[in-house]
Structure formats: structure tokens, C-alpha cells
Image (cartoon, rainbow, N blue to C red):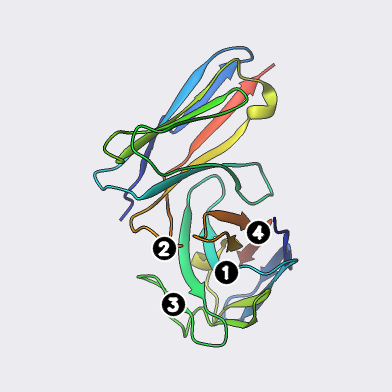
Amino acid sequence: TQLLEQSPQFLSIQEGENLTVYCNSSSVFSSLQWYRQEPGEGPVLLVTVVTGGEVKKLKRLTFQFGDARKDSSLHITAAQPGDTGLYLCAGSHTSGTYIYIFGTGTRLKVLA
Amino acid sequence: SAVISQKPSRDICQRGTSLTIQCQVDSQVTMMFWYRQQPGQSLTLIATANQGSEATYESGFVIDKFPISRPNLTFSTLTVSNMSPEDSSIYLCSGRQGSRGETQYFGPGTRLLVL
């Protein structure tokens, strides 16, 4: 059973546009992570959020954890072709566990 | 940080045979995991590789089909046994570091095609 739904599933935008990817669940997570994966490589961790309402920024990427810790969003400002990839959220239900469940994924393509 | 390598990077196998995938980490990690991923799709956790003991398998995965070893803190193997075309997938190894295992690193994956 997939517990983390991401939307949109696919996104193709022009360079310079802004976008938001959503990660939603009916379950509460103790922590949530976002990854980016490029073809032929493993996912690379971008951020971990642990507190409801927490906002973290990584250059042009802004990550937010929902107040109820059931959802999260990733906002990219002024997207660049280098942002192209598969974005995955992953949530952990129990504090201190190393087990994360991955979301359904969002495939982003940024056109030059 | 940790760099994870996997061997082989890809393979084409015949139905009914078995393939062992090796995972090597360049530094100690607290936990090691094996995932399966269909190209362009999400990751499904197969099992947690436990050092010196039997792996912990997720629902839908069994030891007879996916035997796993982890003889030390930096090395693990996953065997895909008695393969069928449905086993065609990308198999990823990962390791976690940090006091709460908050940082996870992935290998580049092993792309398996079963004919």
C-alpha cells in the first residue's frame, strides 16, 4: 500500500518558471525527506524536515512540512534545466527509526 | 558522508538463474537497505540488511527469493533467486548515517533484465 501520494506525477516547464510539488498522506510522519534522482543514479538526499510547520531553504528550493506532519511541499523558484529529475518524498512514521517509505514520485523536466 | 558502489551495474539473465549484487560503502553506516525500483517510478523497500544476522524483510519479500548477507558494517549482498521476467528492475543499495540515521545515501543501482 502506497502511503505517500505525490502530485503532479509529471511536470514539464520552461526555464525560469516556478513550480510546487506536493507530498500528501493520511498518516502522521515523525520526519520527512526529499530526494532528487537523475537517470542511472541513486536518489540524493536534499533535505530532512522533522517539525510541523518547518520551512527549510536550499538555494532556489523551499521545503515545507505541514503543521499536522501529514504533508509536505517542495517549491522551486526560477527552475533551471539542471533541476530536471525525479523528485521523491520519503516519510518515517516512528521517531528514531531508519525506515522510510517513499512517495509515488514526480518527474520534472525543465526546458531551456 | 558515504559513497556507495554496486556491482554489477547491469546484467541480462536467463529465467531460472540467480544473480548476486554486491554493495560496498566507503565508510561505516548504521543501517543498510535494499530497494527495488521500476525505471522512473518510486522505490520499494525489500529488506533491512542486519550485520551478522538474518535480514528483516518487508511484506511481499521473502528470504528464499532474496537472500541477503551483511558480514560487516560496510558490505552487503542481495541475491535474486530463481529469476523470472517479473524480477526485471533496478536494485538499489543504501546506507544510513547520523545519530538518528537521518542521512541516507544510495548506490547507483543495478539494472537487471530477465529474459
Q: Is residue A38 above or below residue B71?
A: above
Q: Nearer the N terminus, badge 3 or badge 1?
A: 1
Q: Are marks 4 and 1 in contact (CB under 8 Å)?
A: no
Q: Tell if the residue under mark 2 belongs to the same chain as the one under mark 4.
A: no
Give me the C-alpha separation between circle 4 and circle 1. 20 Å
**Which residue corresponds to the image point at 50% horizontal and 47% vertical from the top-left?**
B41
Q: Residues within 10 Å of mark 4 (few under 14, many from 20)?
A: many
Helix, strand or loop at disc 4? loop
Label 4 sits on what residue type?
Gly
Give me the C-alpha separation between circle 2 and circle 4. 24 Å
Residue A93 appears anywhere in the view: yes
Q: Is residue A19 above or below residue A40?
A: above
- Where does label 2 land, which residue? A97
- Where does label 4 land, which residue? B109
**Which residue corresponds to the image point at 68% horizontal and 76% vertical from the top-left?**
B75
**Which residue corresponds to the image point at 60% horizontal and 63% vertical from the top-left?**
B95
Q: Nearer the viewer, mark 3 or mark 1?
A: 1
- Disc number at residue B30? 1
Chain bearing mark 2: A
Give me the C-alpha separation between circle 4 and circle 3. 20 Å
Chain bearing mark 3: B
Q: Nearer the N terminus, badge 4 or badge 3?
A: 3
- Where does label 3 land, which residue? B56
Q: Residues within 10 Å of mark 1 (few under 14, many from 20)?
A: some
Q: Are marks 4 and 3 in contact (CB under 8 Å)?
A: no
Q: Are marks 3 and 1 in contact (CB under 8 Å)?
A: no
Label 1 sits on what residue type?
Thr
